[in-house]
Image (spheres, rainbow, N blue to C red):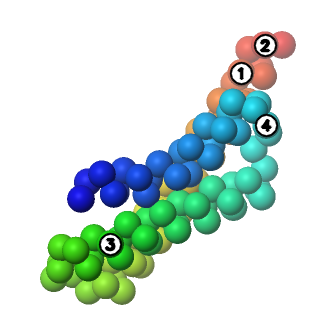
Amino acid sequence: MGIFLIIGLLLPMIYVMQLTKKKQQITWKKTGLAIILSVVGNVIVTLIYQFVQHSAVNVWIALGSSIIVAIVWALLLCGSYAAYQILSNSINK
């Protein structure tokens, strides 16, 4: 089950890595797309986990916490990429 969780968390990470590879500037639009990818990945993984494991946790509580975790995860990824851009630009000058 852990592999599904990793796949759900990797979706926004792969997107941000592609931005890094293409050396594109992070914008609010790209941050929003990363948040959407993260939410979709985490919600799908949470639903799979709930139905396969028959967890005693309420589905709605699990989905709510999954969405919150996904948003925080995407913001951390985009924030670290923005910090990387700022630091690399200041070092290169």
Q: Residue at x 52, y 68 (%)?
A: 40
Question: Which tag is nearer the camera, tag 3 or tag 4?
Answer: 3
Specify which label sits upstream in the sequence, 3 or 1. 3
Specify which label sits upstream in the sequence, 3 or 2. 3
Question: Which tag is nearer the camera, tag 2 or tag 4?
Answer: 4
Amino acid type at image mark 1: Ser
Distance, label 3 to label 1, CA atoms, is 40 Å
Specify which label sits upstream in the sequence, 2 or 4. 4
Q: Secondary structure at mark 2?
A: helix
Distance, label 3 to label 2, CA atoms, is 45 Å
For disc 4, the marked residue is 24
Which quadrant does the N terminus fall into? bottom left
Q: Quadrant of residue 89?
A: top right
Question: Which tag is nearer the camera, tag 3 or tag 2?
Answer: 3
Distance, label 1 to label 2, CA atoms, is 6 Å
For disc 2, the marked residue is 92
State the image coordinates of residue 32 (x, y, percent, origin top left): 69, 61
Distance, label 2 to label 4, CA atoms, is 16 Å
For disc 1, the marked residue is 88
The vertical placement of 87 against 82, above or below, is above
